Image (tube, rainbow, N blue to C red):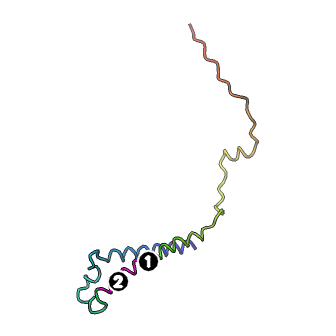
Amino acid sequence: MLFIFGILIILACVLLGFFVLVQNPKGGGLSGSFGGFGNQVMGVRQTTDVLEKGTWVLAALIAVLCLTSSFFITKGTAAKQPKTIMEQAAGSAPVQPSAPMTPAPAPQPTK
């Protein structure tokens, strides 16, 4: 299920990037690149409205997909990893308290 969410999120991100790059910050954008064709079919104002609404819809879709995908992550069922050598040694025999460590005597200087 997470694989499907990942594909949908990536697809929405690519489309959002396309929508943002097509828009012109000064209002020209896609409508200005078609010349007279944009005016005849949809009109300049409608083209920028569609791109702006599409940007908001895709941004909201990405947010919703990211939030809902977290509900499908399984909790506490991580793959069991094999024990390390230290864990095996600690688990096989109980640890006995050792005698307190005393420092070794300092070596005698030689004459």
Whether residue 95 appears in magenta in the rendering, the answer is no
Which three-letter amino acid code belongs to the residue tagged 2? Asp
Q: Which residues are magenta?
A: 45-56
Q: Quarter holding the N terminus?
A: bottom right
Q: Is residue 5 left or right of residue 21?
A: right
Which three-letter amino acid code belongs to the residue tagged 1? Leu
Q: Quarter holding the C terminus?
A: top right
State which quadrant residue 59 falls in.
bottom left
Q: Is residue 75 left or right of residue 39?
A: right
x, y percentage for residue 2?
56, 71
Q: Circle 1: is it few (<14), some (14-19), or many (20+) Cα within 10 Å?
A: many
Reading the image, the residue beneath label 1 is 58
Q: Which mark is residue 49?
A: 2
Whether residue 50 appears in magenta in the rendering, the answer is yes
State which quadrant residue 27 falls in.
bottom left
x, y percentage for residue 62?
47, 73
Q: Residue at x 33, y 74 (%)?
A: 21
State which quadrant residue 28 falls in.
bottom left
Q: Residue at x 64, y 61 (%)?
A: 79
Q: Residue at x 71, y 44 (%)?
A: 90
**In this view, which residue lies farthest toward the top?**
111
